[in-house]
Image (spheres, helix red, strand yellow):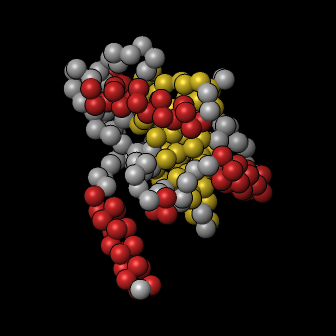
Amino acid sequence: MKIALILVCLFLLTLVVTITPAVKEPPYTLLEANADIEIRDYQARVIASVVEPGSRSSAANLGFRVLADYIFKNPARPIPMTAPVTLEPSGSGWEVSFFMPEEELLQNLPTPQNPRVQLRSLVPARYAVIRFSGLSSEGIIAQKTAKLLGFIAQRNLKALSQPILARYNPPWILPTVRRNEILIQIGMP
């Protein structure tokens, strides 16, 4: 009975992973890998973002819908989905962001119909990143952020941003195979 259950679980896991479409991610150069923490250099990139009030969870849901409308329902042309979707503190709310495909230039993107959607270029930057799977509850986010801040302090690096939560998978993916990250921009020598 246990073997049958394990086989069914493995089958379902394989099915879920294989039906998840591959999406592009912002390219980066890996400078250092240390267990679950990495230091990465990201190239310049373009994001679409919206600021939502409330909790991180409600902002993520509301912001995702607004940004999905921009990329999928834009009358000029649809824009392919990318990963991750990021959330970072912004005033009394949360900035929810989608990365635009690497080949998209800011000046060539369709103008958002919703004035709350902002398009902007991000300059090249270096980040300390901790990767984790599972759910991204407030407790887990706090735990992973503390570990990442400890790594930054231990290395005498300078944190230049608030922690940014990056989610790479749609909500129907099993938590055990979800990819999440916390990124903190650090100074470049």
Asked whether residue 183 appears in the rendered view, the answer is: yes
- As drawn, 119 above or below 81: above
The number of callouts visible is 0
Q: Locate residue 25, reporting x and y percent.
A: 39, 47
- Judge by depth and name the residue closer to the eye, 97 or 10: 10
- Judge by depth and name the residue closer to the eye, 154 or 150: 150
Q: Locate residue 150 relative to residue 178 in the image: left or right.
A: right
Image quarter where the C terminus lies is: top right
Residue at 77% x, 52% y is 153
Residue at 43% x, 48% y is 171
Q: Locate residue 90, reporting x and y percent.
A: 62, 26
- Judge by depth and name the residue closer to the eye, 9 or 134: 9
Asked whether residue 97 appears in the rendered view, the answer is: no
View extreme (front): residue: 1
Residue at 41% x, 86% y is 1
Q: Locate residue 76, reporting x and y percent.
A: 22, 21
Image quadrant in which you'd find residue 119:
top left
Q: Locate residue 71, reporting x and y percent.
A: 31, 30
Residue at 48% x, 29% y is 62
- As drawn, 6 above or below 166: below
- Judge by depth and name the residue closer to the eye, 110 or 50: 50
- As drawn, 144 above or below 70: below
